[in-house]
């Protein structure tokens, strides 16, 4: 649906999978034109970061937080962008806020791991990625393409994480059901 701003943002997000940052920026801008939303801002910030536009990425993530301040996801995206831009003091402040919130309510371990990855604290990033796999965070399906995790990919622990989150074969069938085979 080309008139749906969330779907347009998602199309931009899918362009990030293939490092098509210019196309992702185009989709994010189109979504913002239709209706400002945090998801388009996140896509825009990720695309800007992918293009090395770190100052602009921080500005986009700040806007995402302004549009959805209660989401840990937007705060983690901002903290990661800040860390990658060398603004580690503020990134750590946002991380401290996320960790405090995590003691009161759900914050995805994946989001915390992303911040630690941005700070270059790989051991902490892996600690939280292990937690994300254990909690079955939906974002772990993106381990192989999420550019924010690139600095971790050469580490053997990353391959172990990928194996650990792999889906083990087909789900067991209920007793008495039959398998239907396509012709």
Image: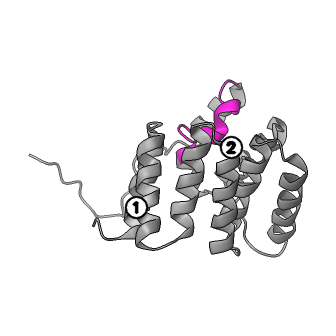
**Residue 144, image quadrant:** top right
**Direction from residue 178 to residue 37 in the image, left or right:** right
Q: Is residue 35 above or below residue 95?
A: below
- Local SS, label 2: helix
Q: Residue at x 71, y 26 (%)?
A: 155
Bin the neighbour count of mark 1 within 10 Å (Cα to Cα): few under 14, some 14-19, many 20 and up: some
Residue 171 highlighted magenta (yes or no): no
Q: Residue at x 54, y 54 (%)?
A: 44
- Residue 78 % position (x, y): 72, 57
**Direction from residue 73 to residue 142 in the image, left or right:** left
State how far apart marks 1 and 2 are (Cα): 21 Å
**Residue that carries the numbered disc 2 in the rendered image:** 54
**Residue 116, image quadrant:** top right
Q: Residue at x 35, y 70 (%)?
A: 4
Q: Which mark is residue 30?
A: 1
Bin the neighbour count of mark 2 within 10 Å (Cα to Cα): few under 14, some 14-19, many 20 and up: many
- Which numbered disc, 1 or 2, marks the residue that appears first in the sequence? 1
Residue 149 highlighted magenta (yes or no): yes
Extent of the magenta region: 142-154
**Direction from residue 27 to residue 103 in the image, left or right:** right
């Amino acid at each position: 649906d080309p008139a749906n701003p969330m779907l347009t943002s998602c199309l931009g997000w899918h362009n990030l999978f293939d490092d098509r940052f210019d196309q992702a920026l185009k989709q994010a801008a189109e979504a913002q034109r239709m209706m400002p939303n945090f998801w388009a801002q996140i896509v825009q910030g990720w695309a800007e970061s992918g293009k090395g536009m770190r100052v602009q990425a921080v500005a986009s993530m700040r806007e995402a937080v302004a549009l959805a301040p209660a989401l840990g996801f937007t705060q983690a995206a901002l903290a990661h962008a800040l860390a990658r831009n060398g603004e580690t003091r503020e990134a750590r402040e946002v991380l401290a806020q996320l960790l405090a919130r995590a003691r009161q309510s759900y914050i995805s371990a994946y989001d915390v791991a992303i911040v630690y990855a941005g700070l270059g604290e790989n051991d902490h990033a892996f600690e939280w990625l292990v937690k994300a796999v254990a909690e079955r965070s939906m974002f772990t399906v993106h381990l192989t393409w999420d550019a924010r995790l690139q600095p971790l990919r050469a580490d053997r622990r990353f391959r172990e994480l990928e194996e650990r989150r792999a889906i083990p074969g087909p789900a067991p069938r209920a007793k008495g059901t039959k398998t239907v085979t396509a012709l």
